[in-house]
Each structure stands twice: as C-alpha cells, then as structure tokens.
Image (cartoon, coloured by chain):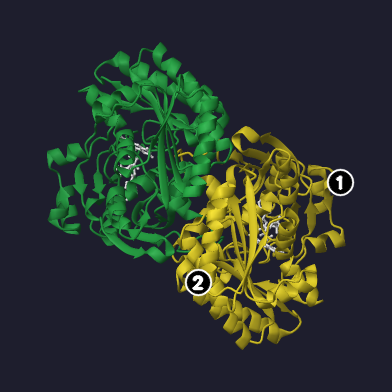
Chain colours: A green, B yellow
Amino acid sequence: MNLIEELAKLLTPGQVTANQTMREQHGRDESYHAMKLPDAVVFPESTEDVQKVLTFANEHDIAVVPFGLGTSLEGHVIPEKGGISLDFQRMNRILEFRPADFLVRVEPGVTRSQLNKELKQHGLFFTVDPGADATLGGMAATNASGTTAVRYGVMRDQVRDLTVVLPDGRIMKTGGLAAKSSSGYHLTGMFVGSEGTLGAITELTLRVYGIPEHVMAARVTFGNVKDAVDTAYEILAANVPIARVELVDAASIERMNRHSQTSYEEAPTLFLEFHGNEAGLNTDIAFVQELAEGHDCKSFQFETDSKARAQLWEARHQLAYAFKHASPGKHMILTDVCVPLSELTDAVLHARSQMDRLELFGGVLGHIGDGNFHTIIMIDTDNADEVARAEAFNALAVEHALERGGTCTGEHGVGKGKVKYQRKEHGASYDLMHQIKQLLDPRGIMNPGTIFPIE
Amino acid sequence: MNLIEELAKLLTPGQVTANQTMREQHGRDESYHAMKLPDAVVFPESTEDVQKVLTFANEHDIAVVPFGLGTSLEGHVIPEKGGISLDFQRMNRILEFRPADFLVRVEPGVTRSQLNKELKQHGLFFTVDPGADATLGGMAATNASGTTAVRYGVMRDQVRDLTVVLPDGRIMKTGGLAAKSSSGYHLTGMFVGSEGTLGAITELTLRVYGIPEHVMAARVTFGNVKDAVDTAYEILAANVPIARVELVDAASIERMNRHSQTSYEEAPTLFLEFHGNEAGLNTDIAFVQELAEGHDCKSFQFETDSKARAQLWEARHQLAYAFKHASPGKHMILTDVCVPLSELTDAVLHARSQMDRLELFGGVLGHIGDGNFHTIIMIDTDNADEVARAEAFNALAVEHALERGGTCTGEHGVGKGKVKYQRKEHGASYDLMHQIKQLLDPRGIMNPGTIFPIE
Ligand SMILES: Cc1cc2nc3c(=O)[nH]c(=O)nc-3n(C[C@H](O)[C@H](O)[C@H](O)COP(=O)(O)OP(=O)(O)OC[C@H]3O[C@@H](n4cnc5c(N)ncnc54)[C@H](O)[C@@H]3O)c2cc1C
Ligand SMILES: Cc1cc2nc3c(=O)[nH]c(=O)nc-3n(C[C@H](O)[C@H](O)[C@H](O)COP(=O)(O)OP(=O)(O)OC[C@H]3O[C@@H](n4cnc5c(N)ncnc54)[C@H](O)[C@@H]3O)c2cc1C
C-alpha cells in the first residue's frame, strides 16, 4: 500500500505530504529527545477528516500522533513507530463566543495567543499560560498550566466540553455547557492529559474570565533561594488570592538580562502578580511586603505601568529560550516535579545542590505557588557523559519528589521521557490506566510509546 | 448459601446484620423513591474488610451498594437487586492532618461537620457544603457541591487522592499530594461522581482552606425573581470573587420563617457571602449593592455578627426539612438542573410557571452563582396523579435545561431517578461510560441500576 496515495484519496492531496523537511519538523519537540520521522504528515480540516484518518489508520495498524505546535518537552510528538503525524494547524477557527457564559468554543489548532487577542475585545482572557505559545488542543492533551494556575487552575479546570474522535471512528462530546454537573463519569477530565493516546480532540469549549479590574506586579529579591521560597510559602499559607508567584534564581536572572535586555538585580527573585479591586490589592500587597521583609528581602520593586509588567512576563516566558540561545547547538532538558507545599523549599535546595554536584549548567525557576518548579539544563546530545549526568539528575529530582508524595511531572506531561517513572508514581493504578488505554485504543495506534511503553 | 453466616465468617459477626429495622434504614434515601431492602447490612472497619467483601460478592454475583448517610436524593443507595448495603459509618477516622499542605486524609465515613469541627482548631475549613450533613465518601461519590462551589469549586476540585477498592479486589491510590500533576490519566476525577458503580472509596485526601480573614453576609430582597437572578448574574459577570450567591424565593422564605423562627421579609431574596480582606470586601460589597439597586432591590440587609450569619445559613440549610415538616407524610422530589449562566433567568421563570401550571406545591431555590437551582416539591407517594405531575414537571425542567446545553443534575447525581435522561444528555459518550463500567465491574455487582439501567 502506498500510504501517501491512500491518504490523499481519503482526504485531498493538499492535505497530505511526505516532504522531508515537513517530516523532520514533525519528528521532534523542543527538547533533547532524539528525532524519529513520521511516514506522512496529514492536515485535517474538520472532525470528519480526523474520523476518516483514524478509522483508516486503525484498520491498517498505522500509528497516529496528534500534533499541535510541537512545543512539548518529553518527546510527546515523536512518532516512535512512524506512521502519521496529524497536524491540527488548519483547524484553527474560533467557532463560537459566549461572553455571557464566559465560554468560547474553538478548534484544537487555535493558539493561546490567537485566542487571547480575540478575547481581549470582549474584555475577557484565557488564563492558562505556559511559557511557549501552544495550541489549545496540545494544552488540553498535556493538561498544561503555567504562571497563573495558582489562582485560576490548570487546563483541566478550564475545559467544559470536548469533541473527541476515537480510533474506531466514534465521535463524541464529553461534557456540556453548565458550570458544574454530577451526571455520569467525568470523561472530559480523562481526555484532558491523555496526550493523544486515547483519541484526537477536534473541538474544545473553554472557560474564560473577565480581565481583572486592577493588576499589579512586583519583583522581590532575596539573599538566598530559601528565603524566596519560604516567602512564597507564607503568602499561600495566608490564603492571599495571588495570581502569580514565580521563582527565578540568580543564574536565570543573569540569562534573562542578557537575552531580554532587562537589568534586573541578579539575585533569587520572586515575580508576583495580583488581580482584584484596588483597595483589596493594596491590602494584599502591603501584607506580602511585610512577609518578604520578614525574610530580609533585598528589594521590593513594583511594576505598575502595563508596559513594564508586560516586559516582566515576556522576559519570564523567554527564559527557556534565553538559556537555549546562550548555548548554541545544545538541547534543553527541563525537570518538572511538583511537591506538596511544605516540601518545596527542600526540593528546590536539593535540586540546586545536585545540579552543582553533577556540574550541570542551568537555572532553577518555577511556578512555586503550586509547588511546581523546573530546572533548565542545556546539554550537548552528542556528549554521552553530559546526557547521562543530566538524566541522572532528572531521576534524582523525580525520586526526591515521589518519595514525598509529589509527581514526576507537574505540567509538561509524561511523553516518552517519563514513562519510566509511571509505575513508581502510580502503582496499581497504572494497570487500570493501561486497561483504559486498551479499551479505547485496542490496536495501540494512538501515539505509541507515550505514557505506556511500546510492547 | 447463608449470606449472613458467610459474611460473618469473612469479617466478624458484629459487622454483619440482617435486622429488619437496619435493612429498612438502608432501603431508601431522603427522597420519594420507593424502598427496596438489602439482604444484609455490613459495616467494614478497614480497606481490607472492604476488599474481602467485594471479592466475595464478586465471586458470588451479589450486589453491593456503598452507603454513607443515605441523604442522596435520586435513590442512589436503594439496593435494586438486594444484596449487601456496605455502610461506612465505622470508618470515620481522620487519619492525617497536613495543615502546612492544606491537606487532610480521612476515612469515607467521616462527615463534613465532623471534619470542620476538627479543622477549625487549625484555622482551616473544608469548603464543600451540601444542605444535609453527609459523609465525605458519599460526597465524593456524588460529586456533591452546595453554597460555596461558586468560589471554591465542587467536590471533584477538592479531592487530591483516593484509595479505591475494585470489585476484583484490587486496591489502588488514584492520585497524589501535589497541587497539580500531568502524570497519567486522571482516575481521581473519574471515581469522583461514580456513585459507587465502579468500586468503593476507602480513603480520601482532601484539600482544605484557611478560614478567611474577614466574612460578611447579606440578604437582598427584590420585587420579583427575575430581578434577583439578573442581579446574581451581573455580580458574576463583573467577576466579583463572591463566596456564596443563593436564591430563595418568597414561598421558600415563608417556609423558612415558620420552621427556623426567622422573620425575613417574604420576597424573592439573594443570600450573599463575601470572603477576603476587609478593604477588598468593602469595595466588593459597595459594588454589589449598586448592582442590586439597579434592579430595584427592596432591601439590602447585612448580617455582620457571626451569630446572625450562622442563623442565616442554618435556616438556608434547613429549607428542605422546612418543606418536609410542613407536609407530614409527604416525600420530597427535588429538581436539580444546572444551565449556562445566560440561560438561568429563563430557566428559573420556566420552572416557576410550570410548577404553578401543574398545581404543585413547592419552592424555588438554588446555588444560582453556578447556574444550578432546585425546586423542592412535596408529594404524597400514594397519590398516583400527584406523583405523575411531579415527575412530568421534573422531566420538563430537565428537557428545558438539556436543550440549552445544561445538565439534568448539577450536584445530586444520577442515582436511579435520572438514568432515563442519560442517553439524551450524553449521547455517544454514554456508551463509553458504560464500557468503562463493564471494564471495572464486569459482573455488574456495584450499585446496579445506578447511572445505568439494570439489563
Ligand atoms: C519554552 C517552553 C516553555 C514551556 N512552559 C510551559 C509551562 O509553563 N507550562 C506547561 O504546561 N507547559 C510548558 N511547556 C510545554 C508545552 O508548551 C506544553 O506542553 C503545551 O501544552 C504543548 O502544546 P503544543 O500545541 O505545542 O502541543 P504538542 O507539543 O504538539 O503536543 C503535545 C501533546 O498533545 C497531543 N495533542 C496535540 N494536539 C492534540 C489534539 N488535538 N488531540 C489529541 N492530542 C493532541 C500530542 O500528541 C502530544 O502528545 C513549555 C515549552 C517550552 C518549549
Ligand atoms: C436536605 C438535603 C439537602 C441537600 N443539599 C445538597 C446540596 O446542596 N448539594 C449537594 O451536592 N447535595 C445535596 N444533597 C444530597 C446529598 O446530601 C449529597 O448527595 C451527599 O453527597 C450524599 O452523601 P451521603 O453520605 O448521604 O451519601 P449516600 O446517600 O449514603 O450515598 C450517595 C452515593 O454515594 C455512594 N457512596 C457512598 N459512600 C461511598 C464510598 N465510600 N465509596 C463509594 N461510593 C460511595 C453510594 O453508593 C451512593 O451512590 C442534599 C440532601 C438533602 C436531604
């Protein structure tokens, strides 16, 4: 069988390609994982297109890997078994605005930045904010989060309804429009975070929020990482409804200054943001300032005008790229553990010291309001020793987190890179996950090697 | 086989009974659904006890119905096929406090009020607040919510980890302690709301919150229901972080005054509550007062001291019982639809007018901040015509909600009473739910007739 010809007949020739550059673009993500090429890249334009492709692939035992923007970090989109990379870039329409219900319905290829541009005109915004621009399909499939999850929740909290196509061609809606429901099993929550292993998402109904009346950001520097993390912990313990609490260590600020032309003090720093009414914010901020002073903060700098604020978050978002650009030819490995709040300070200090011990170059940063932090390490993938040390470090960070009730991945997902930690993290429930995988995808065509090993 | 003897051997004789009164107490819930008796009532004292009972029942095709406090409203706990009622009242220990992580680990028989009493000493509280006292196992199994969901979310949002026992005897933990995770399928979310149809919950790790610095409640009366609902809608549209927004109609206030010795004005009323710091609250309240005045509110009454506030919410919680006591010998039927916010005013007005048309006696009330409202109707279950009119009314309310993207049950769950609406609400995904049910419970021993019809 000539796969390209068959797919071109199924859809239209313009929706299918085996072009080498295209295949390479769909053969890896933004991390250090090794490339593997799909046999074909397919661009569906509708739910029915997706249904045709999945049914066909299922009949012929051809692997299918859904593809958003390929910004995931654990080899999620790498077609381990070749087959079809199903790229949603042409399904990028915003289908329906329901501002009165704080809902929007979109195709999976719509990006976060595209959506927010449209929403702004309605005085609304979409809260989930990963570092990279990403598609909403990819964000749902990885249960992405980012800087604002501490206040507004993760991707799973924003998804009200999904249209999904199963490998056997069934099309279904998993939810509804009501703000809450106790009707039936929560399938929406199961498809969110399933990383393209159960089926393809072809439509999403998402919750959006009104742009807050008042926004205030601040940068707070400390003498050491411990004081920064402890301050963050106390802010949350006091139940201040803070919108963002990001840790950026001195090494990361240094990179940031070079890459984003900022001139922030190169010290362990908290980036904070507050949303609310002005009177309430002022009270909250005064209180947070007191807490920070209790930990001998070196400076507490407000970014009141919206330009300085935008620059702050843009610099924060560029941070991974700042490391990347400083190490041309190298690739990123990001750790992503999330631990119970009380374990956070220890976990961050443990990571920093192990990184130093293993002579790895990188920064510590993270969404520490949720107990989630990353280390960004740049490695030369041709240097076996450097790769081994980086992977050993990742394993140490994961073990440390799992022993404390944490997770191997707070937001990036399992992909291929964290399959090896699944049994340890989930125990007997990993078997049940596998049974569910087999129930929905008995031939194992959906993103093989992701979440579960290839048998 | 003598079931009681076999079970007594499996556990201890004191954990098993076939006493008639006991069987009757486990044969119905607090609603109008007809009683059916279990053959035995069993009181497990540990996860291992539950494992023994489920394994035994599975081998012998005996139905098992988990039982919390039996306050559910759609016949959830009625043993349609007899068998075992598995009552968790002896598993009522608080196993672990982790105040520093805002977590608590409990057995499923712990009640909400018991938990809150303990938490108070740590300056913490558990947010989910259904009208009745209930067990945390039952609340998780129904995805319960109540007055505070508009601010803190529903039961599913509070459950971080569950220990579950499957019919085949497998014991597993579904989650972890981290505030967020992208590791594997979200099994926790699937067991929450599964109404005892997939397995039994034997431990829960729950998120708790710090008691807010400042709390303020208010009662606002209006000339008609539409103005009350429209005001609630505008409060949410403005993104005021309100903690409670309850509608209570005039008929309900009248019942409330008689039952709870209050003397509230008998008019459509909003019960409001605000949590936060004092300065922020004052701003929010002034703003809400403006909105209410825009809808010609008749009065805006603050309940500032904590006693008057407690009385307000106690009266609200007693409302169903207020109706019940006014109609001795009659039984309750509560509708429970939830609709997108923009459809709320219409849905409430539709319900009120249909209730009047069908000459049913009852009140309209609800958690309208989530688009969820109830009508409480008292019926004489021996009066076939009255039952038929009440059921016709329920069906009308459900149809109206489903046609607008809403759900047949915002918080009470499907039980036996709402099985008939499942196909219409869920379409093709109802089949997938059924496949999951068959995967976990192939012999169909877990709470037969709930969520799915008996085959
Ligand atoms: C610099 C940088 C910073 C980042 N910061 C964050 C962060 O702060 N928080 C965070 O959560 N992540 C972060 N990420 C990771 C990444 O951006 C997210 O995982 C994002 O959600 C991936 O979206 P994508 O559109 O690129 O999806 P892809 O990478 O294309 O795909 C991701 C997964 O989703 C599946 N998928 C995609 N579309 C569909 C669909 N329609 N149906 C079914 N499955 C589908 C794929 O098969 C794959 O398994 C960062 C990445 C980078 C490079
Ligand atoms: C006056 C009144 C007001 C109410 N108000 C509200 C409200 O505001 N919001 C709301 O959500 N509900 C409300 N309810 C309904 C009811 O209180 C909730 O559904 C509650 O969650 C039931 O808890 P329970 O412990 O009584 O459970 P039960 O009624 O005993 O059981 C409920 C379901 O959970 C299952 N179950 C129980 N324990 C377990 C376990 N350990 N493992 C697995 N399955 C289990 C049972 O099999 C059953 O299907 C109200 C009820 C009344 C009578």
Name the residue at 36% across, 41% down.
A130
Q: For residue A316, what is the image quadrant?
A: top left
The numbered dot on residue B14 is 1
Disc 1 under 8 Å from ligand 2? The reply is: no
Residue B440 can be seen, yes or no: no
Where's residue B4, x and y in %?
82, 52
Q: Amino acid at mark 1?
A: Gly
For numbered disc 1, what is the local secondary structure?
helix
Name the residue at 42% across, 38% down.
A411
**Mark 1 to mark 2: distance in Å?**
63 Å
Q: Nearer the viewer, residue B413 or A419?
A: B413
Where's residue A118, x and y in %?
29, 57
For numbered disc 2, what is the local secondary structure?
helix
For mark 2, what is the residue?
A: B294
Q: Amino acid at mark 2?
A: Gly
Quadrant holding the C terminus of chain B: bottom right
Q: Quadrant of ligand 2?
A: bottom right
